[in-house]
Image (tube, coloured by chain):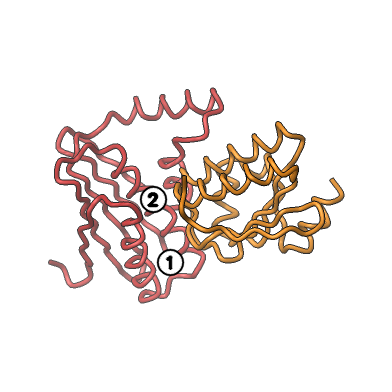
Amino acid sequence: MKTDDVDLSIPMLPDMELTATTVAESLGAFIGLETTKIDEVKMALIEACINAFEHSRSSERRIDLSFKISDKAMTITISDGGDGFDMDDALRRIEEKRDKGEKRGWGLTLIAELMDEVDIASSPSGTLVKMSKYR
Amino acid sequence: MSTESIPVTVNGKVAIVTAPGYVNEKSAEAISEECSGLINDGVSLVLIDMRDCRMVNSVGVAIIIEIIEVLGEHGGSLGFCSLSETIAKTFQIMGLKELAGMYSDQEEALAALAAA
């Protein structure tokens, strides 16, 4: 384990995403991230967690988070160990929802808009969301 | 039926609903139930005071959008006040700025909603 990483594993239970946001808030303060940026990280983290809870179909019913802090950024990696998904298909379905005026399905959009860098890798062994907020 | 308690007060024609610290699916449904009751009582102007709210999730916000639509069907409207910068940004991303007024505080909101 690297000394500048904080690792957390949480069960997929209602409001358990708040445990993750508590860690993010604490680490954000630790590296001197502005309050607004911490709030944006928390909001994006909530969306990443509930996406994993709702869509991963993980048999373990847990997600693993790794928080990496540096003097430049906070980077959070969320891993769900689920079935994975096709990003192109997901983006197409999001666009269809927007066209129909549906109110749900905003998670990925919010993560992309609130964080400075987002990378999502998905395969049949799970989805990895890596997102960073710069100081 | 949601068991979460949502404070509601009435100021003239406007019902003021105080949002909790985290607007998620459960608390948004509780807000929705309160608003349904208000509509049944003939109240159609609703202000959601966000002063205590520090986090929302998109499922909760989607339910709030449904509330806005129902109020609109009854000739009413909804506004928000005292939003944090990040929640205001989140609402903007989700298109709420086009659907509901956003005000800096209760005083401004009440004046705008009553005049509408």
- Under tag 1, what secondary structure? loop
**Residue receiving disc 2:** A117
Alpha-carbon neighbours of circle 1 within 10 Å: few (<14), some, or many (≥20)? Answer: some
Residue at point 42% right, 75% down?
A32
Amino acid at the residue labelled 2: Glu
Viewer-proximal residue among B32 and A135: B32
Q: Which mark is residue A53?
A: none
Viewer-proximal residue among B94 and A3: B94
Chain of the residue on which disc 1 is drawn: A
Relative to A94, residue B19 above or below: below
Please state if A91 lies on the left or on the right of B105 as rendered: left
Sequence order check: which comes first, mark 1 or mark 2? 2
Residue at point 26% right, 31% down?
A85
Q: Name the colour assigned to chain B in the rendering.
A: orange
Viewer-proximal residue among A128 and B76: B76
**Residue receiving disc 1:** A135
Alpha-carbon neighbours of circle 2 within 10 Å: few (<14), some, or many (≥20)? Answer: some
How far apart marks 1 and 2 lie (CA) works out to: 12 Å
Relative to B36, residue B108 above or below: below
Please state if A1 lies on the left or on the right of A50 as rendered: left
Please state if B44 lies on the left or on the right of A62 as rendered: right
Q: Name the colour assigned to chain A in the rendering.
A: red
Amino acid at the residue labelled 1: Arg
The lab-note entry on whether marks 1 and 2 share a chain reads yes
Chain of the residue on which disc 2 is drawn: A
| Residue B49 figure quarter | bottom right
> Residue A31, position in %: x, y?
37, 74
Residue at point 21% right, 54% down?
A64
